[in-house]
Amino acid sequence: MTTGGAGPVPAHLPVMFAEVMEGLAVKADGTYLDGTFGRGGHAQGVLDKLGPGGRMLVMDKDPEAIAVAERLCGDDARVSLRRGSFADLAAWPAANAGLDGGLDGVLLDLGVSSPQLDVAERGFSFTKDGPLDMRMDPDSGESAAQWLARADEKEIADVLWTWGEEKQSRRIARAIVQDRVAQPFTRTAQLAGLIARLMPRNDKKAHPATRSFQGIRIHINRELLDLEAGLDAALACLKPGGRLTVISFHSLEDRIVKQFMARLAKAPPANRRMPVAIEFTPTLRLLGGAQKAGAAELAANPRARSAVLRVAEKLQADNAAVAA
């Protein structure tokens, strides 16, 4: 990473890079948080726009991502690193991180990263055989294999239905519980194979295990619970005028982000049964609607097809009063 100036586009081009940079509107002397460093493409873009007085805060659950951050920008005096979930942003001591003055921008690039998917040993992929792990932080909590070994049929079905939106959740859960008696599920190919046998692929593009793997991964990593807590923490840490930019990759994530931003930007619908209108003071201003990757990016990176970017700006107190 460079230490200021216009800088080049990063070698690892992350999803919707240009749109994220436009949304953050980076100030040379600003303070920014990348809550999901990954392989650093977005963070590098921010650093390239920061001057010597700017600050960059980096968080990630994944120790491999933090190792990359230490290698790329650990010697940059403008950068502070912390391994952990962005949901725990409020626990980062303000004086140590530069949070005492507030943040000018927050970026959350949600879901599983390409490096995590591409390394079979991480256990996220249903197309590459590896240990059935799925933890973004392999040193914390139980693995997918451990959970599948102890959870009852109802709990497994609920996770597949709630977090994976899998219509065959009960059927899959029943088969998992039956089959694990003879052979515990320890490999991704083993679980994917079971689901494929239950749900033949036919001519469908998506692998039949797609939704089940999503549901288990979200449950193991507490992704949606962390997202709700992280959005609240980000709002609290943003300065008035600061930008919140969030990239989602499936409808459950995007629904949480959309509803969070709308709840703070728009007055609730009038209720005819209530004679007195409830006073509403917005704290966010929506900057456009949902953005999708363009055709050129989709041609180069098919994984961007499900990405949705939303951007909002925290309002000044006086502007909020006027908007209300």
Image (cartoon, rainbow, N blue to C red):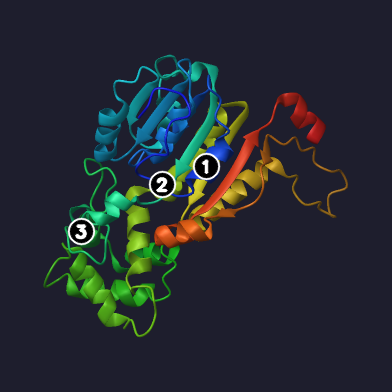
In the rendered image, the vertical position of residue 296 relative to residue 260, given as above or below: below
Closest to the observer: 40 or 99?
40
Which circle's residue, 2 or 1, is located before the other in the chain?
Answer: 2
- Element type at mark 3: loop
Q: Looking at the image, can residue 157 be seen?
A: no
Q: Nearer the viewer, mark 3 or mark 1?
A: 1
Crowd band around label 3 with a 10 angstrom C-alpha radius: few (<14), some (14–19), many (20+) = many
- Return the residue at label 3: 132
- Return the residue at label 2: 14
Numbered label tally: 3
From mark 3 to mark 2, how far is it between C-alphas?
A: 26 Å
From mark 3 to mark 1, how far is it between C-alphas?
A: 33 Å
Q: Position of residue 224 (x, y in %)?
A: 45, 49
Q: Marks 2 and 1: CB-CB under 8 Å?
A: yes
Q: Report the amino acid beneath label 3.
A: Leu
Q: Which mark is drawn over residue 20?
A: 1
Q: Residue furthest left?
A: 182
Residue at the spot 44% in from the left edge and 23% down from the top edge: 4
In the rendered image, the vertical position of residue 222 relative to residue 145, given as above or below: above
